[in-house]
Amino acid sequence: MGESVTEATVTKWLLEVGDTIQLDDSIVEIATDKVDTDVTSEVEGILTEKCFQENEIVKVGETLVIIEIKGEVVSQSEMNIDLDEDFEPEKNKVPEEIEVSTPKKIANKLELEMEQASSLKTINVQEGNRFYSPLVRSIAKKEGISLEELEGINGTGKDQRLTKKDILVYISQRVGNVIKTDPLVKSDKFSVVSSSSTISNGSDQFREMTRMEGLIAEHMMSSLKTSAHVQSFIEVDVTNLWDWREEAKSGFFDRENEKLTFTPLFMSAIIKSLRDYPEINSSIEGQKLITKQQINLGMATALPDGNLIVPVIKNADHLNLVGLAKAVNDLANRARAGRLNPEEVKDGTYTFTNIGQFGSIMGTPIINQPQVGILAIGAIRKMPAVIETSKGDFIGIRRKMILSHSYDHRIINGATGGLFVKRIADYLENWNETLPY
């Protein structure tokens, strides 16, 4: 699970005791506090025992599942036994029902399985709009199912991921023409009817919270009970920043093959301000305040199911604007595809969330424990503003937004919290970044 991860939760068993397992089959879905992943089989055999039930905690190193793998029957001559005059065959005969594999044959079999697994993992598993396991893609290729057709199949796995059972059901129904389509929608996409956890009672609907929803709810309530939340707000004129990006984004994409969004620009200003006010880049552990030397910047990212995840850019202050843009795009894309690893959502020292992308002009974000501050960035809007010049004041149209800074009033006073967000505003209003080309 990665360094420093000590446990995970079993969220869903994908196979049952007695099921036959093929190489690279997904057996069970597990989750840490933010990252969900499948455990796949490295061998072929039969699932004989589940050592944990759904929603139980598994420590790293514990046995999760037991798989029985079929050995090879070895004849007496193959066992390479040196016979002497005193050898009695009947007393030393291996029972016929017992299957014995020599170490050499086991090693050869494992090498073959590793080669097979390696060849499967070279398949591109991220195409289209969602993640497909190597096994699913292998089945789709064998059955002649196109990527466009895969996109239309409903998945029953975590976050609607397509499982082996989903595609096999689809294939069986595809042959029998049992697949349902909506006659009112002109679409070649298909859907397989699957069970739902939503219960309807008249006009109301009830469903259980997903595991991630439950964890987020618990994390947010815990933060509110832990920190003394207080907010400072400031309006920022980002007209110059807007104009600079409009001029630079085309050349940036041509040279770096990356989109230049506002996110790395905001991050650049946040990083500079954290250097100016290092006490904001801190955490509280018990009665101790720890000022971090590294600036590990977390960025809240919306997932397709509506939940949020916070991937972290480690040592963000060591990256220039190009490096920040590449890191932002990479983490955001893999977060939405469910392909982050546990280490990429840990050890953040400060967090920001761009609520402006949803149309919000301001907000009061909840601190991501054990950090002491979080910044919400509002929508950029055209606003009438008084512009001061040497020839007098006049009204003009400017692009403005609101920054909302939540901080822990137990150790960050109002002056520091307010000056910090004011410093971010100053860097954004006086933007003078130059690209390295």
Image: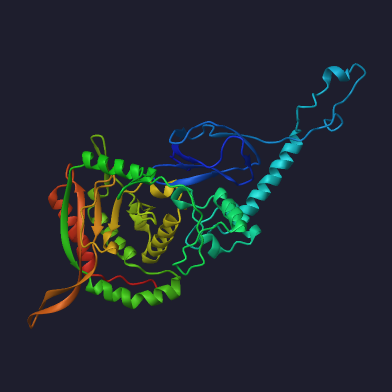
Residue sitting at the far front = 202
What residue appears at the point 43 percent right and 47 percent down from the top-left corner? 196
Residue 93 locus on image (x, y percent): 83, 22
Quarter of the C terminus within the rendering: bottom left
Q: Can you say whether 347 is above or below 10 in the image? A: below
In the rendered structure, the answer to whether residue 389 lies left or right of residue 110 reads left
Q: How many marks?
A: 0
Q: Is residue 304 visible?
A: yes
Colour mode of the rendering: rainbow
Q: Can you say whether 14 is above or below 264 in the image? A: above
Residue 32 locus on image (x, y percent): 42, 42
In the rendered structure, the answer to whether residue 361 lies left or right of residue 161 reads left
Q: Can you say whether 133 is above or below 12 in the image? A: below
Q: Nearer the viewer, residue 153 or 429?
A: 153
Q: Can you say whether 338 is above or below 432 in the image? A: above
Residue 346 locus on image (x, y percent): 38, 46
Q: Quadrant of residue 18?
A: top right
Residue 376 locus on image (x, y percent): 24, 57
Q: Nearer the viewer, residue 169 or 215?
A: 169
Q: Is residue 134 visible?
A: no
What residue appears at the point 36 percent right and 72 percent down from the top-left corner? 435
